[in-house]
């Protein structure tokens, strides 16, 4: 299946069912909505979140109709957040293709994001579960809160390590954790399994985002499908730089903040990259992500042994070794 992670291959027939469900949900009789929706479906990503939800449900039992519906809910919500995020970051490319707001302009992109968010909430009501609806709406709130906090920090450039973890908890770990918890909810899992999956997801999400931030320093644009060092250009200070600055004298710290504030050029970006490497920022961020990944794996302990649990464990390892 195109784009599916190898780890999730044993669940291919589940994922194919989801694919059909998602394409059907995206169809619209409003021409412009349908055009943008088709573009999104054509350039879809790894569908990591719906797959994670389905495999989480599988650690407890068989996937049920509510499992597929909720998998579509999280993909809709995630897509909505990315369409809005690309407007906020004014990104040219997503997954190697032009972003919605570059193809159709920002006004339509914002409305499409709102539309997808509404669709996601409507789809959640189809499960008839207030707990599912509440979890989804709470995540949407956390995503938006995280994005607002990040915007504010990019303006002030005064982010601390604590701020960083709060922000990535809201903007990334919240949805990944909710996918795991929602998977459990869709199969009526006992509370201890639900909690175990939620904890696994929160840690997996933190590790995932730290790796994302590392890739921005480590990767090249061909593999990433977006420019490397884009975070610095977007005035985002992430963990590798935070750790490097902690080891830097005051003068150097001030210089870096000034460069970022004024908009770093190519040469200045290389200077910051060099500094991050020299001050072991990358190594320290990798170590931190590794510890969090171990906590994710430990959180799986209460769940019964199964191929799905094995896949989640393998996924935690993969999250840190991936190249894009
Ligand atoms: C990617 O971050 C973006 C997110 C994880 C979520 C952003 C959330 C919003 C914009 C709030 C809107 C939410 C809804 C529900 C409509 P990134 O910019 O660090 O990663 P990237 O490199 O993939 O762009
Ligand atoms: Mg972005």
Image: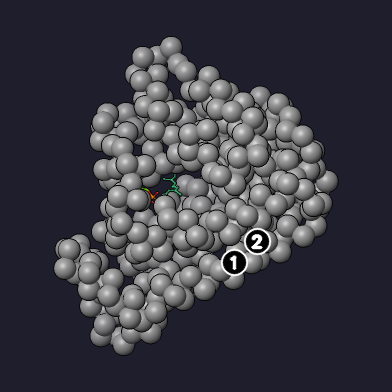
Q: Secondary structure at mark 2?
A: helix
Dot 2 surroundings within 10 Å: few (below 14), some, or many (20 or more)? many
Name the quadrant containing residue 251.
Answer: bottom left
Mark 1, residue position: 292
Where is residue 79 shown, x and y percent of the image? 46, 37
Q: Nearer the viewer, residue 84 or 308?
A: 308
Report the residue at 43% width, 34% height from top: 44
Name the quadrant containing residue 265.
Answer: bottom left
277 relative to 9, above or below: below
Report the residue at 71% width, 26% height from top: 65
Where is residue 250 shown, x and y percent of the image? 30, 86
Report the residue at 72% width, 40% height from top: 57
Report the residue at 50% width, 48% height from top: 143
Q: Nearer the viewer, residue 232 or 166?
A: 232
Q: Secondary structure at mark 1?
A: helix
Task: Classify residue 226 as left or right of residue 142.
Answer: left
Mark 2, residue position: 296
Disc 1 vs disc 2: Cβ atoms closer than 8 Å?
yes
């Amino acid at each position: 299946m195109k784009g599916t992670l190898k780890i999730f291959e044993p669940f291919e027939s589940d994922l194919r069912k989801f694919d059909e469900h998602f394409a059907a949900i995206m169809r619209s009789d409003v021409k412009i909505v349908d055009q943008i929706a088709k573009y999104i479906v054509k350039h879809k990503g790894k569908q990591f979140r719906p797959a994670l939800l389905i495999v989480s449900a599988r650690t407890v039992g068989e996937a049920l109709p509510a499992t597929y519906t909720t998998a579509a809910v999280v993909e809709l919500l995630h897509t909505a957040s990315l369409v809005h995020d690309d407007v906020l970051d004014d990104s040219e490319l997503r997954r190697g293709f032009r972003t919605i707001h570059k193809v159709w302009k920002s006004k339509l992109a914002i409305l499409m994001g709102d539309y997808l968010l509404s669709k996601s909430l409507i789809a959640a009501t189809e499960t008839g579960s207030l707990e599912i609806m509440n979890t989804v709406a709470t995540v949407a709130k956390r995503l938006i809160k995280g994005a607002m906090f990040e915007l504010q920090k990019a303006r002030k450039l005064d982010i601390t390590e604590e701020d960083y973890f709060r922000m990535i908890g809201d903007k990334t770990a919240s949805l990944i954790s909710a996918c795991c918890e929602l998977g459990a909810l869709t199969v009526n899992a006992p509370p201890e399994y639900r909690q175990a999956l939620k904890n696994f997801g929160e840690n997996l999400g933190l590790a995932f985002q730290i790796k994302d931030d590392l890739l921005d320093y480590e990767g090249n644009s061909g593999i990433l499908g977006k420019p490397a060092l884009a975070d610095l250009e977007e005035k985002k200070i992430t963990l590798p730089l935070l750790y490097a600055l902690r080891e830097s004298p005051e003068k150097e710290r001030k210089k870096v903040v000034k460069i970022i504030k004024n908009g770093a050029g190519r040469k200045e970006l290389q200077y910051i990259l060099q500094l991050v490497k020299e001050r072991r920022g990358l190594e320290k961020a990798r170590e931190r992500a590794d510890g969090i990944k171990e906590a994710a794996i430990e959180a799986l302990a209460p769940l019964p042994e199964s191929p799905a649990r094995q896949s989640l464990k393998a996924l935690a390892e993969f999250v840190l070794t991936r190249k894009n």
